[in-house]
Image (cartoon, rainbow, N blue to C red):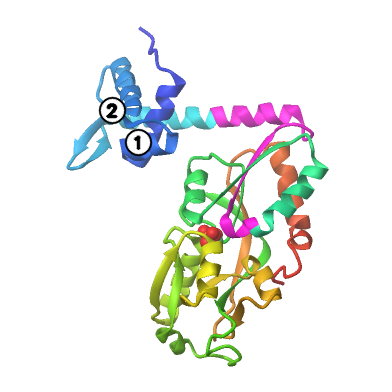
Amino acid sequence: MPLNVSLRQLRVFEAVARRSSYTRAAEELHLSQPAVSMQVRQLEDQVGLPLFERVGKGICLTEAGREIYHYSRSINRALLEMEDVVESLKGVSRGRLSVAVVSTVNYFAPRLLAEFHRRYPGIHLTLDVTNHDQIVRQLEINQVDMVLMGTPPGDVDVAAEPFMANPLVVIAPPDHPLVGERKIPLERLASEVFVMREPGSGTRQSLERFLAETGTLIRHGLQMTRNEAIKQAVRSGLGISVVSLHSVELELETGRLVILDVQGFPLPMDWYLVYRRGRRLSPAAKAFHEFVLAEARGLAGPLRGG
Ligand code: PGA
């Protein structure tokens, strides 16, 4: 009897196996956990063997599970390739493009995407604005064509091309006692309270790496998931913070925030254009790739960061 398995069952099974968890797979696929369990159970019924076994609190693949995982990955890859080929047949004037950017990029992304849209009005573009960790997840599951982010993930096989400098600066309210001091030693930061981004933020991860490398200790104050909230908190005197220069253009111009001249800062980061290596790029994705590398610096705005 031929195996009567559906692509949906294989896709759900692949996610559970890759994430080693029904719950995480359900989150990723935007399904309920019972729906995920049911798909896996139906696949097991078809195969006639269990595909997962419980180990302590977790699950792991059985021998049959490992075999099916191997094939379900190739089938998923082939499906994605098929979608890309179909897109290429439509040519660059049509097609879909999904772009994800970290929230900080969103300070210049609209200008960039507006110009891209003017040049290629037939490309249907969707933009997702989220944080570093969420984007890494989207790259892992091959859910997005192109990404603009600060720190490319080390553990996902991606191509990452820097396209513009992204200096991270220390910001303070204009009446802060350290304003105007030159080359403030890092140790002075120890007595300051920092308004922090959430742990999934790329900005926060870059700051923490720098602090660990230089052995600098800081005091964490409030934690906020939005740059806008961070800027308000700093303006209200709740602490100082480290943000991308691109996110504070307006506040610096109007003097509502100032940059502190701290040793080691600005942290010399870059913005990267990132996509899954080996993913065949559709004409729309290729057009976006060329466009960002050629035009982003000019379109990003007055500061540009070098
Ligand atoms: P985030 O992005 O802090 O908004 O996550 C910055 C980055 O990717 O470095």
Amino acid under disc 1: Ala
Residue 179, image x, y percentages: 58, 88
The quarter of the image holding the C terminus is bottom right
The quarter of the image holding the N terminus is top left
Amino acid under disc 2: Leu
| Mark earlier in primary sequence (2, 1) | 1
User: Where is 285 relative to 62, above or below?
Assistant: below
Which contiguous range is marked in magenta?
79-106
Regarding residue 71, the answer to whether it shows in the image is: no
Specify the farthest residue to the front: 236
Q: Quick check: marks 2 and 1 in contact, CB under 8 Å?
A: yes
Q: How far is mark 2 from mark 1, CA to CA? A: 9 Å
Q: Secondary structure at mark 1?
A: helix
Q: Is mark 2 within 8 Å of ligand 1?
A: no
Q: Looking at this view, is 55 or 190 the one in front?
A: 190
Which image quadrant for residue 36? top left
Left or right of residue 262, residue 197 in this image:
left
Residue ID at (75%, 62%)? 297
Q: Residues within 10 Å of mark 2 (few under 14, many from 20)?
A: many
Q: Which mark is residue 17?
A: 1
Q: Which mark is residue 51?
A: 2
Which image quadrant for residue 71? top left
User: Where is 136 relative to 64, above or below?
Assistant: below
Residue ID at (63%, 69%)? 248
Specify the farthest residue to the left: 56
User: Where is 72 relative to 233, above or below?
Assistant: above
Residue 160, image x, y percentages: 60, 55
Q: Secondary structure at mark 2?
A: loop
Residue ID at (26%, 37%)? 60
